[in-house]
Image (cartoon, grey):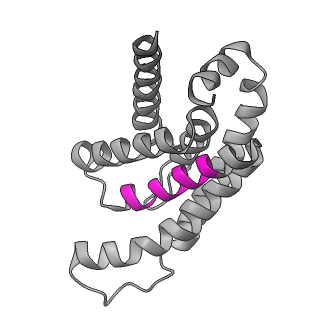
């Protein structure tokens, strides 16, 4: 029975990774990926912090390797996904996952992007610490609101609750 549950978890994780990879380029403006925030919040509520983090890391790597997106794909996703999942795990409220995504991506991810992009570009002449914050914050807020509206409906379905039970026991 335990291996059956593990296969289900990995399958759901793979589906979430595929959805994130396919949907994140939609509505994407350089440095602002609201659909990534939609999937981060959804994954956080559906699967919890660790699986949401794995989803964000794998998707960021795929975006960088296959779509040529700079390391902002990584810094913009991992903090929000994990913090959204952590706050949801603690409080079990969808809106707490939204707060986690906004703080994680909009604040922590944007600030972590500065040293990463200085390293990536080899120059700090054109960059300053808060250069990514407006776009990251905007993308995180808009994507999180969309996710919250989707979760209002999804969280009432039996299938969603059944999947959650796999990850939150």
Image quarter in which the C terminus is found: top right
How far from the left and from the top, in percent, is residue 125?
31, 90
Q: Quadrant of residue 100?
A: bottom right
Which sits in the foreground, 165 or 94? 165
On whether residue 76 falls in the magenta region, the answer is yes
**Residue at the far front in the pictured view:** 2
> Which residue is nearer to you in this view: 76 or 160?
160
Q: Position of residue 90 (x, y in %)?
A: 70, 48
**How many marks do you count on the picture?**
0
Q: Residue at x 48, y 78 (%)?
A: 131
| Depth order, front residue of 57/141 | 57
Q: Residue placed at 54% from the left, 55% from the top?
A: 80
Residue at position x 45%, y 36% from top? 20
The picture quadrant where one finds residue 25 is top left
Horizontally, residue 20 falls left or right of residue 38, namely left
The location of residue 73, given as percent across then percent down, is 38, 55
- List the single residue furthest toward the bottom: 125
Q: Specify the principal SS of the magenta part.
A: helix
Q: Is residue 167 above or below residue 91?
A: above
Look at the image and give the residue range highlighted in magenta.
74-86
């Amino acid at each position: 029975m335990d291996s059956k549950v593990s296969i289900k978890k990995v399958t759901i994780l793979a589906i979430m990774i595929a959805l994130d990879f396919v949907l994140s380029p939609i509505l994407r403006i350089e440095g602002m990926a609201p659909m990534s925030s939609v999937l981060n919040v959804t994954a956080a509520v559906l699967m919890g912090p660790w699986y949401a983090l794995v989803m964000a890391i794998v998707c960021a790597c795929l975006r960088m390797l296959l779509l040529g997106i700079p390391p902002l794909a990584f810094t913009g996703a991992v903090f929000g996904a994990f913090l959204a999942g952590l706050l949801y795990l603690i409080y079990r409220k969808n809106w707490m996952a939204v707060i986690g995504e906004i703080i994680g991506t909009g604040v922590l991810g944007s600030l972590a992007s500065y040293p990463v992009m200085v390293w990536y570009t080899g120059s700090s002449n054109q960059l300053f610490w808060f250069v990514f914050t407006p776009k990251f914050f905007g993308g995180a807020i808009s994507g999180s609101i969309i996710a919250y509206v989707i979760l209002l409906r999804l969280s009432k379905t039996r299938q969603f609750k059944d999947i959650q039970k796999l990850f939150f026991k």
